[in-house]
Amino acid sequence: MDMKQRKVWNENHKKLKEIILKPEVHSQAVQLILSQHSLLHSTSTIGKATHLTLEDALLENLNEATFRQYPVQNPDTRNSIVWHLWHISRIEDMTMNILVADEQQVLNTTDWLNKMNIPFAHSGNDMSESEIAELSSKIDIDSLLAYRASVGRRTQEIITVMKPGQFKLKVEESRIKRLFDENAVLENSRWLAEYWGNKTIAGLILMPATRHIFLHLNKCIRIKTKLSKNIQFQ
């Protein structure tokens, strides 16, 4: 996804905000969500994109050292690319599967934490520097990408079966409670659960499931670009 295609993505996101709460164009909204979302995962994950996705652009020629580099000296983040990919995957998993669908997280469908070689089941908000460093150095990258792909496919399934009018529904309190019961959100990140608790299903789709991913992938691409330039000038 080049800069022109990212501009189109942003324009389509604005269009989605205009129509997502209108039951009379529900099918159109669903198709636009699926298209916008597919452009944030690799082509091999969902297979609906007609050109390289934003994740494709990130992963192209990305070496392990760049993946794991922590801290990074970017104006908007110090965190590694692997941390960002893990964070957006966890946020997408818990918001779509717990808050929207009230079903099992992808994380718990198989032994994903052991596969990824990390102990962190939460969202990653408010992590200490030592925890970010541990995740950045130890996480199994192939398993992380496989987990992220599974989360993406599951989101597509959830969106596909949404009914007209469901996008207007508020998040149920029992589902917010599940976030804490399953250690998806820690007590010191209660603000995040409260933020989501004030959202409609549409609000969750417009931010965690799409815009949030877009923003973090762009951060990752900026990290990749800067680190690549540093290597060239060494």
Image (spheres, rainbow, N blue to C red):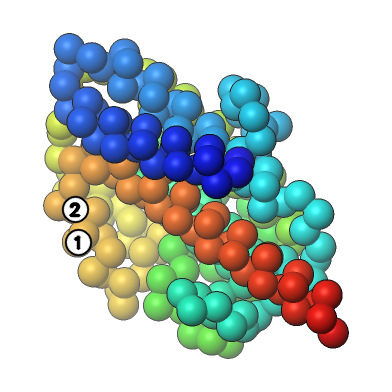
Do we see residue 7 in this rendering? yes
Residue hosting label 1? 194
Local secondary structure at mark 2: helix
Q: What is the number of the mark on residue 136?
A: none
Residue 45 horizontal/vertical position (percent): 65, 33
- Do the residues bearing badges 2 and 1 touch, measured as CB atoms within 8 Å? yes
Asked if residue 132 lies left or right of residue 168, the reply is right
Q: Nearer the viewer, residue 38 or 163?
A: 38
The residue lying at 66 percent from left, 35 percent from top is: 52
Q: Nearer the viewer, residue 23 or 221?
A: 221
Q: Name which residue type carries label 2.
A: Gly
Do we see residue 93 in this rendering? no
Badge 1 density bin: few <14, some 14–19, many ≥20, Cα 10 Å: few
Residue 91 horizontal/vertical position (percent): 43, 54
The residue lying at 49 percent from left, 79 percent from top is: 75
The residue lying at 81 percent from left, 63 percent from top is: 63
Give the quarter of the figure containing the C terminus: bottom right
Residue hosting label 2? 197
Asked if residue 169 lies left or right of residue 87, the reply is left
Disc 2 to disc 1, C-alpha distance: 5 Å
Asked if residue 48 lies left or right of residue 194, the reply is right
